[in-house]
Image (spheres, grey):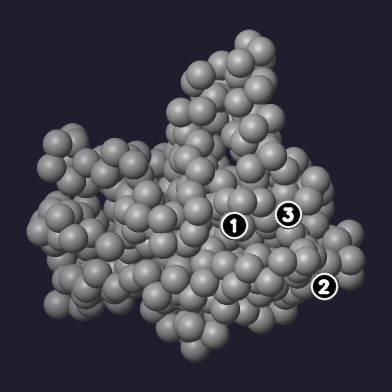
Amino acid sequence: MSVIRVSAVVFVNDDMEVLTVRKRGTTGFMLPGGKPEPGESFKETAVREVYEELGLRISVPGLQEIGVFTQPALNEPGMMVEAHVYLAPIVDTSWGKVHPQAEIEQIRWVHPVEGNLEHQAPLNTEAVFPALVEQFEDFDVQKSLTVFMGSSMGNNPVFSVEANRLGLEAAQRGVRLVYGGAQVGLMGQMADAALSAGGDVLGVIPEFMVPLEKAHKNLTELVVVETMHERKARMAEEGDAFVALPGGPGTLEEFFETWTWYYLNQHSKPLYLLNVGGYWNPLIEALESMADAGFVDSRYFEALTVVQDVDQLFAELGW
């Protein structure tokens, strides 16, 4: 029996549902993915196919291998499919960025145990889903931390020390860092520390700021967008949580917009102030004063946690 070799990608959302797709002219659902092109690795195929089918950008280092599975092909009677299956970072569906493209006509999120498995491909029901169920207790989905921080160093050496520690700790814990993409200041310090330890770092920077902030060219992935609004939206989309290190007005603007989005129910991701050397004390006092004056609802503080160092940050995150 002939074998079709493909790459397939598992996306899991916050409800532990798996993203499946239906191609135009078919009735069954399969995992996103497809056949390698000449010279491609299976991981490279996975990255390309996911972008072509769903418009989602993922990186090769962000993929974790689940296994190689063989089952009857869904759309080719009498054929077998051998799928190299990878786990991708969690997709936050609240941002509405998953859209069928190319030959994909429909997407469906399905729970491997509790969902309606009708019309799912044998690869899913007989192989991948059971494998996922076995791993749910230890499901190592890569987390992403979006970091807002200064493009300057500041005048207290402790700022640089803690930025370096954040980069190193994130790399050692397998946490991907998402930040503004600059090579200078605390931003560059954190990115360099993470990269030197083998970490995964995504930078997002507007085109007009590439020369101004000296875009970091050695990141795992650098995304150049057109506007500041796109930059903030992409950083928010990519992160599972947010933290602000010392910085200036730009750091505050990014952090407060993300915090406001939480208050307006646009996301439910936690936010942290990393109060390095007491840097954020005046801001915390101002916020408390605003609350006392009746201008900040108590719900505003539900997502915000003040931490004193990187160790406490990761302890609160549970990563």
Gap between marks 3 and 2 measured at Cα = 17 Å
Q: Tag on residue 111? A: none
Q: Secondary structure at mark 3?
A: loop
Q: Tag on residue 247? A: 3
- Residue 141 location (% of width, % of height): 32, 59
Gap between marks 3 and 1 measured at Cα = 11 Å
Query: Label 3 is placed on what type of residue?
Result: Gly
Of residues 199 and 190, the one nearer the viewer is: 190
Mark 2, residue position = 214
Q: Tag on residue 276? A: 1
- Residue 103 location (% of width, % of height): 49, 51
Position of 258 with respect to 117 (left or right) is right
Q: Quadrant of residue 71?
A: bottom left
Dot 1 or dot 2, earlier in sequence: 2
Q: Residue, x 49% and y 59% (percent of image)?
A: 309
Of residues 299 and 201, the one nearer the viewer is: 299
- Residue 178 location (% of width, % of height): 58, 60
